[in-house]
Amino acid sequence: LDYAQEHKVLVLCYPSHATHIYQGLDVVIFAVLKHRLSQERDAFTRTHIEEIT
């Protein structure tokens, strides 16, 4: 946690057995993140010889 704090990383902790509460995050937040990461991966692949697997 010290490393995260030093590098301004926000650490979230979710209670166990509460995934049903956070299912909305999959659609709202993580879907957007997945799309953005896919775009970054594609851009990286286009500019480098090696492929990411």
Image (spheres, grey):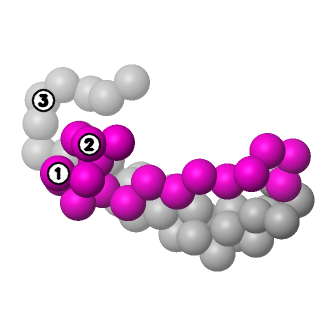
Q: Quadrant of the C terminus?
A: top left
Q: CA distance from mark 3 to mark 2?
A: 37 Å
Write the start and end of the magenta stretch as one range: 1-18
Residue furthest out toward the bottom: 28
Q: Say whether residue 36 is magenta.
A: no
> Residue 42's x, y, as percent?
31, 49
Q: Which mark is residue 6?
A: 1
| In the image: residue 28, left or right of residue 12 | right
Q: Residue 6, relative to residue 32: is it above or below?
A: above
Residue 2, labelled with which disc?
2
Q: Looking at the picture, how far across and down is residue 44, in whole percent? A: 20, 46
Question: In the rendered structure, which amino acid carries the disc numbered 1?
Answer: Glu
The reply to whether callout 1 and callout 2 are in contact (CB within 8 Å) is yes
Amino acid type at mark 3: Ile
Residue 35 seen anywhere in this rendered image of the structure: no
Tell me, yes or no, whether the two marked residues, 1 and 3, touch with CB atoms within 8 Å.
no
Residue 49, numbered label: 3
